[in-house]
Image (cartoon, helix red, strand yellow):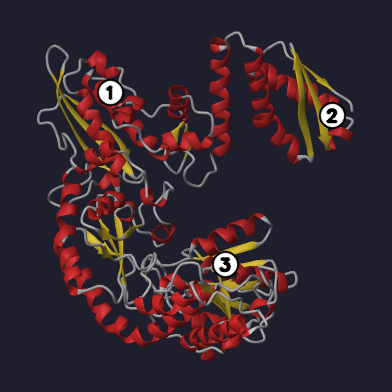
Amino acid sequence: MWEYTDKVKEHFLNPRNAGEVENANAIGEVGSMACGDALKLTLQVDDKGTIEDAKFQTFGCASAIASASALTELLKGKSLEEAEKITNQEIADYLGGLPKEKMHCSVLGRQALEAALSNYRGEPQKEQEGEIVCECFGVTDVEIEKAIRENNLSSVEEVTNYTKAGGGCENCHDTIRELIAKVREEEAPAKRPKLSNIQKMRMIEETLEREIRPSLQQDGGDIELIDVIGNRVLVATRGACAVCKASELTLTHLVEKKLRELVWPELVVEEVKE
Amino acid sequence: MKIIYMDNNATTRVAPEVLEVMRPFLSDLYGNPSSAYTFGGKIARDIREARELVASILGASPEEVIFTSCGSESDNTAIMSALSTGKDKMHIVTSRVEHPAVKVLCNELAKQGYRITEIPVDREGHLDMEQYKESLTPDTAIVSLMWANNETGVIFPVEEAALMARDRGILFHTDAVQAVGKIPIDLQKSAIDMLSISGHKLHAPKGVGVLYVRKGTKFSPFLIGGHQERGRRGGTENTASIIALGKACELAAKRMEEENTRVKALRDRLEKDLLNLVPNSRVNGGGPERLPNTTSISFESIEGESILLLMDEFGICASSGSACTSGSLQPSHVLRAMGVPFTMAHGSVRFSLSVYNTEEEVDFVLDKVPPIIEKLRGFSPFWKPEGQVCASET
């Protein structure tokens, strides 16, 4: 059984604004029966660009219904500019949070809002943007990248929780991993602050743990972080790596490249012989 | 709030008679049945009696009964034993609608290089026997087919399937956790080599199960340790629960007729009246070859978790094959294997009754559920008042 907050339960049991706005001038429909949840949002926007009325119709679980109910409450009385800025996180926050596996319900709300606003502006129904990555749930790379960016996601599991992508046959997990790496790479230079030594060490450790050790271990090798002195990263190799002639190449090429890319561009990896 | 418990395929209440016989073994009679002195050793006699009661409901001999910790352990033991005694055989035959205890194990075995054939089912949930027959090869180590499906109650012709396997020298295992106590079983007359039971599905407590292994079947233990269960399952006996399971089997044998008359009539009424009261609903796997206590009903255009949580407000307990309740994102593998359309699969609710259910409880459910369905359909984008579902969404 899911652990829902009281607010989620309350909005599920007594949904606000269920139904359809008559003479709606902004309509957004997202999701499908096959995906397991769908939301139709209808809005009445007045001449001054204020949302006078908002209603929803939802097919989905308790948290999908509660998220849609919350969204309509958030929207009523807002200007279009303000509405534009409502994120899926705000929908979740309004409800006191959602179980992480159910975050996609709040994303559905945000998508319906976008669809309704673009419908109001008279834009033609958006063609599907990007390529389908997840065949099971029909999720595109554009949608996945957006979710990664907006919610700072870092694992396939998180992407599934937010977008459903990867929740079926799991064939697209590698592609999702690539998209996560891609977004992270894009964001890395702009966001890179000056690192403290402690932050640097922690990031080096994390990068080794996540990006490097698994692939070394697959080949029967391993690597251990010994120390970090300034930009010098001292490591020791283990298992197959320790006796492998190519290990020096592995270190400079794989480890250093990854660490420079993800942590700090001036790092130098040195192997400590014991 | 009174609990209306209609989820007996998930678990059952411990029968008061069962609780009574097990209680002393949780307090005064705490000896180890393997001990030399009377205080412990006499408990071995009680276990022997329980073993006889279990054997009796199966039409088996007591020495063919191995006590385990649960149905999943029994399923795992059976399949792993067949693989380790089956020389180099690398093929397993099972179905698309098995319980995870078999299905997920087979997925893992596939990663280790075993070849798995999952026999499909038709729209009514019946096994494709032609394809089953063709799937049996000299390389097949074991067939594992459930006796009755937990979600729909559909019964597989396992006795016929076991005969086909025996003709080809292949071991046959059946997960019978939903069948035992609900339909008659006579293993003496069958070609089934191994069979799994779970205590908590028939009014014994959780944490005890049985693996039946036919005399003469090559066997390799899963849990290795002491000499308990004649060296076939290590670990000190779960005395109280074993005694309880014996009593539960004795009770189930006595109540089998009630299960197939009164309980079946309750189920039939619940099913028929719900279909009448709620338009655009249908039964999944509603043929005659079905457990007497189970009905899986799909309500079009709405989602199962919402239904369950609204029923929960009235204390009604049932299950759903919808994606949202399972923790995965896809509806139940059983309904998908049966080709139940998405419009229906997400809105499925399984009611599973027991001898403890009453006419009044069925009335209560019939009173509460139709308005719940109506409420949810009232704000479903796929529900049209005239009952037409958008064609593009089906």
Identify the chain of the residue marked 3, using the numbered disc in the image: B
Residue B370: horizontal and vertical position, in percent? Answer: 16, 58
Location of the N terminus of chain B by quadrant is bottom left
Gap between marks 2 and 3, in whole Å? 44 Å
Given this view, does label 2 or label 3 mark the residue nearer the observer? Answer: 3
Q: Please tell me in which quadrant of the rendered image residue B201 appears.
A: bottom left
In-image side of A266 versus B61 (left or right) = right
Residue where numbered disc 1 is placed? A124
Q: Residue at x 16, y 59 (%)?
A: B368
- List the residue tagged with mark 2: A247
For label 3, the SS is: helix
Q: Which residue sits furthest left?
A: A22
Note whether B335 is above or below A90 in the view shown: below
Q: Using the image, determine if residue B335 lies above or below residue A93.
A: below
For residue A273, which quarter of the picture?
top right
Q: Which residue position is annotated with label 3?
A: B73
Please report the residue visible at 74 percent of the width from the left and 40 percent of the height from the top: A218
Assess disc 1: are there few (<14), some (14-19) or many (≥20) residues with their C-alpha within 10 Å of its C-alpha: few
Q: Nearer the viewer, residue B53 or B176?
A: B53
Compared with B76, A12 (above or below) is above
Element marked by disc 2: helix
Which amino acid does the dot numbered 1 rest on? Answer: Pro
Residue drawn where x is 52% and y is 71% of the image: B131
Label 2 and label 1: CA atoms lie apart by 56 Å
Q: Amino acid at mark 3?
A: Glu
Q: Amino acid at mark 2?
A: Ser
